[in-house]
Amino acid sequence: MPENKSESRRPDLSDFIPEEALKHAKAARKEMRKSMEAIFPPGFMEHRRAARKEILLAAREIINHALDRVEDA
């Protein structure tokens, strides 16, 4: 597992996508987030983040269960 968030298993996108395009995509993401915060009521983003985490935890449990079944077989 990566030591910190800067270490990632994903390939460096700059190998596939021009740096300028990445810069624009990051700016677009930042502006989209601002627009969502303006549209939705306060607290929405926190609830959205918590829901996303719960979905990922559920997926992890499903994968762990499947791995246990494979190991038992």
Image (tube, helix red, strand yellow):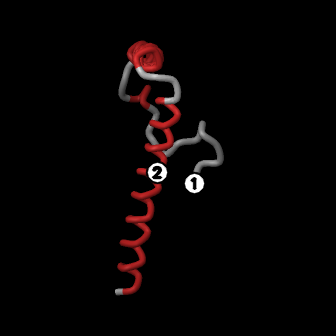
Identify the element where label 1 is drawn. Answer: loop
Q: CA distance from mark 2 to mark 1?
A: 20 Å
The 10 Å Cα crowd at callout 2, few under 14, some 14 to 19, many 20 or more, is: few
Depth check: 9 or 37 in front?
37
Question: Disc 2 marks which residue?
Answer: 54
Q: Position of residue 50 (x, y in %)?
A: 50, 42
**Which mark is drawn over residue 1?**
1
Residue type, numbered disc 1 = Met
Depth check: 53 or 20 in front?
53
Observer-side mark, 2 or 1, equals: 2
Depth check: 11 or 40 in front?
40
Residue type, numbered disc 2 = Glu
Q: Residue at x 60, y 39 (%)?
A: 5
Q: Residue at x 39, y 18 (%)?
A: 18
The answer to whether 47 appears left or right of 6 in the picture is left
Query: Which sits earlier in the primary sequence, circle 2 or circle 1?
Result: 1
